[in-house]
Image: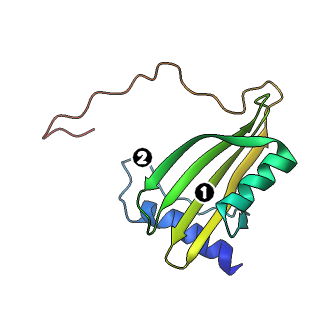
Amino acid sequence: MKTLALVLALIASPLMAQTPPAGIKPVMVRMQLFCADSFEFLMNVLAVDFQEVPVALGYLKEGAEEATTIVFFRNESNTNSTIVITKRSKRGEQACMAWSGSSPSGMAFSVAPDPQFPPEPQEGTEM
């Protein structure tokens, strides 16, 4: 339970430090996470037990100390996917499955082929 609370606090703390835009409000939810003491171990479990491999990732805080990464896994037929969040600090590493599910239609993970990004806001204007 301590591990779960710590992981949730580490994930949520950057969000809580920010003021959300108008119309967005914080909501506390209860979630069960499945965590391992290393990303390599969790990656091997997903490969062997679920035939899932990493297909995309994002470094949310780069560097050797206090690094946070989000990794998207999926199986070859794209019917199962898992989101893993890793946190590395001076005290060690922890990797947690934050979400896992299936899509019988084969849409477990999709990338927008041509994302349409909004223009950068001009100085002195609000979004």
The percent coordinates of residue 94 (x first, y second) are 63, 68
User: Hey, which quadrant is residue 96 in on the image?
Assistant: bottom right
Mark sitting on residue 23: 2
Taking the image as shown, residue 65 lies to the left or right of residue 121, namely right
The percent coordinates of residue 122 (x first, y second) are 17, 34
Residue occupying the point 79% across, 47% down: 47
Residue occupying the point 59% across, 60% down: 86
What coloring was used for the rendering? rainbow
Q: Amino acid at mark 2?
A: Gly
Taking the image as shown, residue 120 lies to the left or right of residue 63, namely left
First reached walking from the N terminus: tag 2 or tag 1: 2
What residue did someone put label 1 on?
85
Q: Residue furthest top?
A: 114
Residues at circles 2 and 1 in contact by the CB criterion of under 8 Å: no
The percent coordinates of residue 3 (x first, y second) are 66, 76
- Distance from label 2 to label 1 (Cα)? 27 Å
The percent coordinates of residue 88 (x first, y second) are 53, 67
Residue 25, compared with residue 30, is above or below; it is above
Q: Amino acid at mark 1?
A: Ile
Instruction: Choose between 112 and 58: the one closer to the eye.
Output: 58
Name the quadrant of the C terminus: top left
Q: Secondary structure at mark 1?
A: strand
